Amino acid sequence: MTRPRPSRRGFVKTAAAGVGACLFPLPLLAQGSQPRMVVIGGGFAGATAARFLKRADPRLDVTLVEPNPVFAACPFSNEVIAGLRDMRVQLFGYDRIAADGVAVVHQAATAVDGKARSVTLGNGTKLNYERLVMAPGSDPRFDALPGYDQAAAERMPHAWKAGEQTLLLRRQLEAMEDGGTVVMTLPALPYRCPPASYERASLIAHYLKTRKPRSKLVVLDAKDTFSMQRLFENAWQEFYPNLEWVPVSSGGNPTGVDTAAMTVSSDFDTYKAAVANVIPPQKAGRIAQLAGTADRTGWCPVDPVTFESRIVPGIHVLGDAAIAGAVPKSAFAANAAAKICAAAVARLVRGETPASPKFVNTCYSLAAPDYGFSVAGVYQPVSGQWLEVEGAGGVSPVDAPRAFRSQEAKFANGWFNTITSEIFG
Ligand SMILES: Cc1cc2nc3c(=O)[nH]c(=O)nc-3n(C[C@H](O)[C@H](O)[C@H](O)COP(=O)(O)OP(=O)(O)OC[C@H]3O[C@@H](n4cnc5c(N)ncnc54)[C@H](O)[C@@H]3O)c2cc1C
């Protein structure tokens, strides 16, 4: 899986001897070498980046480092939780990426030395790189909500990473007696895909309404406003009298949990939960912290054109882990940004200037199985940060007929199938 490569230092020394008096190293590809690109994380951002780096220039030696042989996708995992979808359709392997010529190594990256330009893997192997793309997603902050640590997540799942956590929450809802209260907590921004938390509230409310009609859902929220709010609230009013949303101004801010007592506290109250879904505050995946690319916010500041870290040169940070201005932390944006980054890195390696990018993000949400809506935005770098292009995006109309919502639910499905087959198919 891994091949021994000359170290970067060794390579630079050889190259310098070859060019004699030339003070500026020639672009690596011009020197006939196969520069090594390492990508950490085989999710929406990293898997896209690995594939598109190889496509951007087949001469690049691309290694994708990802511990899991199967990727579990978060989009549509709320449907799994609500019993509307099978988990198996959320799972994707890496064979097609490997078939494209990417070396796929199923190990976790445990350390990054930005100065020596090397990545250490769980099995002790070291990979040298010319450029590193880091896309480890986001991690729960287990120090942020009193009582909520890794062990608590086994009792009160976050299900904010798809896989075992998704199935755990699903099983808990199934096992709950009719008449119980489900409590959800939602953190303040920024976190992975905020609209997905309101989608989850809707779909859990749908499950309760159809399968456990004497039960109710209480959503404790550290916010007063959120994206597509009127669309969600209208749907809740129409479909879910069993859903109580408590915003921060009404005392909804989650302040702690007690897993032994199965209680969740907010600014004003303590709620007894039959099932608790705690979505905690988040930060960039741990390896981003270890590599020194995260700042005091826990997220990674990047240059908007190349996604190169503003802290550690030679490392490009993508997806949820990056601070990308107005760009949302979504799979759609992670995939788009990864293509931009792959093209930019290929140009940098060739000694060319990366093109100034622009991209679209669309987030679909389901408020019921056949009832969807969306928000779209166009983004471009302005004065060193990603801003939304005014007037270019939009939200689904509030007063659209039911057929329109049904059509948007189909578009959502279509988007998921397209993006996952582009990345993994
Ligand atoms: C319930 C839910 C619903 C969502 N719905 C949508 C939606 O409808 N549309 C949308 O656009 N977005 C949606 N999202 C958001 C989307 O899932 C994320 O924004 C997206 O997954 C981010 O991509 P990423 O590559 O940054 O992280 P991920 O996709 O999480 O990938 C990170 C990868 O890095 C790997 N990794 C971590 N650490 C290491 C390490 N040390 N070494 C090697 N590999 C490592 C992980 O194993 C993982 O495979 C949803 C999220 C949730 C939680």
Image: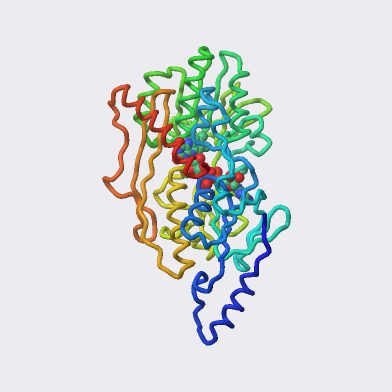
- Residue at horizontal 50%, vertical 56%? 53
The correct choice, above or below, for 233 with respect to 210 in the image is below
Residue 212: % across, % down:
54, 14
Q: What colouring style does the render use?
A: rainbow
Q: Is residue 379 above or below residue 194?
A: below
Between residues 144 and 335, which one lies in front from this camera angle? 335
Residue 120 visible? The answer is yes
Is residue 187 in view? no
Q: In which quadrant of the rendered view does residue 175 lie?
A: top right
Residue 226 appears in which quarter of the rendering? top left
Whole-percent x, y for residue 160 in the image: 55, 37
Q: What residue is at 49 percent from the left and 79 percent from the top?
A: 24
Which sits in the foreground, 255 or 160?
Answer: 160
Residue 136 horizontal/vertical position (percent): 57, 49
* Residue 329 falls left or right of residue 67: left
| Residue farthest to the bottom, as pictured | 21
Name the quadrant of the N terminus. bottom right
Percent of width and height locating residue 131: 54, 63
Nearest the camera: 197 or 53? Answer: 53
Q: Residue furthest front?
A: 99
Q: Left or right: 189 with respect to 92?
A: left
The number of numbered badges drawn on the structure is: 0
Residue drawn where x is 48% and y is 40% of the image: 421
Q: Residue furthest right?
A: 123
Residue plotted at (59% across, 24% down): 275
